[in-house]
Image (tube, rainbow, N blue to C red):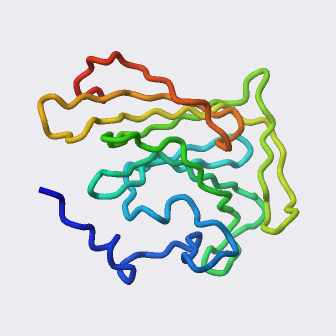
């Protein structure tokens, strides 16, 4: 039997629209990366260097046909005392959201985790926009490596034959790009988390 349709996914009036999500008919910006799947879970928040904050998790369809690991990037501009997000004076600026990995067929991504290191010798220079616009001002600084891991469970995931793979990747440019994920466990692992 097929799982029931997700009412949030099938009824647009029930979706909660985030301020960074654009409607399909708004062609001024591409649709941001998390707006097309109805659910997110397993949040992880980490602080980075020079005011960076990283918010990671999974984003998925409830029928488990699509899932992914994401990282949203934020920057503390450190330019306002007594900031108030309701009045547009919050010193924390949303930068963007990056997809770290998407699920392969018959796999559900789950159990994400991130860690952030301090800049080490040879660290890359991160360039983060501090304002919107076609030529925004940027902040440049040395970034620490960001590490991400997650589990990929074979579907259906309620059988004794279900296996999982632990994946690992990293970014040296403050989460802008990611290396191809590595598989950390052997092929005969049963439900490694």
* Percent position of residue 51, x then y: 70, 49
Of the pair 11 and 142, the residue shown nearer to us: 11
Where on the picture, by quarter, is residue 104? top left
Query: Is 40 left or right of 181, judged from the image as shown?
Result: left
* Percent position of residue 21, x then y: 55, 71
Image quadrant occupied by the N terminus: bottom left
Query: Is 183 left or right of 20, judged from the image as shown?
Result: left
Q: What residue lies at 26% left-to-right and 56% top-to-bottom?
A: 63
Query: Is 81 left or right of 184, judged from the image as shown?
Result: right
Q: What residue lies at 44% left-to-right and 47% top-to-bottom?
A: 68
* Percent position of residue 73, x then y: 62, 52
Of the pair 92 and 177, the residue shown nearer to us: 177
Q: What residue lies at 27% left-to-right and 20% top-to-bottom?
A: 189
Q: Is residue 32 above or below residue 191?
A: below
Q: Is residue 20 above or below residue 11?
A: above
Q: Is residue 18 above or below residue 77?
A: below
* Percent position of residue 183, x then y: 44, 23
Q: Is residue 39 above or below residue 115?
A: below
Image quadrant occupied by the C terminus: top left
Q: How many marks?
A: 0
């Amino acid at each position: 039997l097929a799982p029931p349709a997700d009412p949030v996914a099938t009824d647009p009036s029930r979706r909660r629209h985030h301020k960074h999500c654009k409607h399909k008919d708004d062609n001024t910006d591409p649709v941001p990366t998390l707006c097309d799947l109805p659910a997110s879970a397993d949040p992880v928040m980490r602080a980075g260097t020079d005011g960076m904050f990283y918010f990671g998790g999974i984003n998925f369809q409830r029928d488990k046909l699509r899932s992914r690991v994401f990282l949203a990037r934020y920057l503390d501009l450190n330019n306002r005392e007594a900031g108030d997000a309701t009045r547009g004076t919050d010193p924390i600026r949303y930068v963007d959201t990056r997809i770290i990995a998407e699920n392969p067929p018959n796999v559900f991504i789950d159990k994400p985790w991130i860690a952030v290191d301090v800049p080490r010798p040879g660290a890359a220079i991160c360039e983060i926009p501090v304002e919107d616009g076609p030529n925004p001002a940027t902040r440049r600084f040395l970034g620490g490596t960001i590490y991400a891991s997650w589990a990929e469970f074979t579907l259906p995931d309620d059988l004794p034959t279900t296996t999982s793979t632990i994946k690992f990747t990293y970014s040296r440019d403050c989460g802008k790009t990611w290396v191809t994920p590595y598989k950390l466990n052997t092929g005969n692992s049963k439900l490694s988390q």
